[in-house]
Image (cartoon, coloured by chain):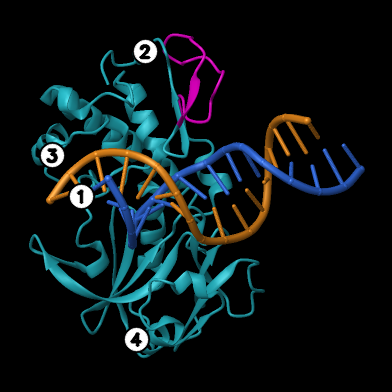
Chain colours: A cyan, B orange, C blue
Amino acid sequence: MPELPEVEVVRRGVADHAIGRTVSSVEVLHPRAVRRQPGGASELAARLAGRTLVAARRRGKFLWVDLDDDSAMLAHLGMSGQLLVQPEDRPDEKHLRVRLRFDDDRGELRFVDQRTFGGLTAVDTTEVDGERVPVPVAHIGRDPLDPRFDLEAAVGAYRRRRTELKRALLDQTVVSGIGNIYADESLWRVKLHSLRPTATLTRPDARRVLGAATEVMTEALAQGGTSFDALYVDVHGESGYFDRALAVYGREGEPCPRCGTAVVRTAFMNRSSFWCPTCQKVPRRR
DNA sequence: GCGGGCTCCTGTTTGC
DNA sequence: TGCAAACAGGAGCCCG
């Protein structure tokens, strides 16, 4: 699943292969990929045609390209989305959803998405906290890799919440970029339980868990970078992120790398949490 | 305003 | 062997 590190790899690819180019046409092959676009496929095509891509930017798991008219092309990869720069004569991918052609012959940009949780939209931008961002991103918090990320503000925000720690980590409005995989890995690193009430977190606890999230995503980014192929804007998972050093995620029944206790999986918000029952004590009061 | 549960979707895996 | 159910999960939306 593309989380922050994978989206950053894609952003770099878009920056290298698509910036400075001018869109000539847009073809939508699946309406669900543009379901968040007011006006649908025709509106997306109308807003993008003739526009030049100015800069590739990211906040958390949201990726966008600034256009030369102060609007933006916003992409979210969802669970299975990819942005690929492909030669025009390359056969269409099975799950190709949107195709952007340019007014040059350096390949087309393809949005490919098997499970269609992702999407592409052309949107207005707005000023938030001294920075122009797409309107649908206005409520998304800065991610820990953002130079302007405010750690102490995030620590305070977590401690004010009346919820459980993992829920808070997955909430993109406070701190963005952390998904299910990195939430579990971060909690394991600092020996905290996913159900720990955020109200009982000490400031050092909150700093440690955010520090761990930053650390694990930085490490994954370093690995994701190595799988980058200059021919593609590549986020195809298989090669890139299965050799990540995951301690607990997806490792039910395997020994905890720290203490050897079998990793446990529990249901959480219609998905899974992986954790070590020895290192991560269940909070007494919930 | 905030918290929490539901929903969307499809290929793969698991279980009977 | 074959079919059906479970599973994966980000984020918008709606309700209390």
* Residue segment shown in magenta: A246-267
User: Of label 2 and label 4, which has the lower sequence position?
Assistant: 4
User: Of label 1 and label 2, which has the lower sequence position?
Assistant: 1
Q: Is residue A82 left or right of residue A199?
A: right
Residue type at tag 2: Cys
Q: In the image, is residue A281 above or below residue A114?
A: above
On residue A279, which mark appears? 2
- What residue is rendered at 32% in x and 67% in y? A64
Q: Nearer the viewer, mark 4 or mark 1?
A: 4
Q: Which residue is mark 3?
A: A157
Residue type at tag 1: Asp
Q: In the image, is residue A131 above or below residue A141?
A: below
Q: What is the secondary structure assignment of the residue under circle 1?
A: loop
Residues at discs 2 and 4 in contact (Cβ within 8 Å): no
Local crowd size for mark 3, using a 10 Å CA cut-off: few (<14), some (14–19), many (≥20): some
Local crowd size for mark 4, using a 10 Å CA cut-off: few (<14), some (14–19), many (≥20): some
Q: CA distance from mark 2 to mark 4?
A: 52 Å
Q: Is residue A250 magenta?
A: yes
Chain letter belonging to callout 4? A
On residue A47, which mark appears? 4
Q: CA distance from mark 3 to mark 4?
A: 37 Å
Chain letter belonging to callout 1? A
Q: Which residue is mark 1?
A: A146
Q: What is the secondary structure assignment of the residue under circle 4?
A: helix
| Whether labels 1 and 2 share one chain | yes
Q: CA distance from mark 1 to mark 3?
A: 17 Å
Residue type at tag 4: Arg
Q: Nearer the viewer, mark 3 or mark 4?
A: 3
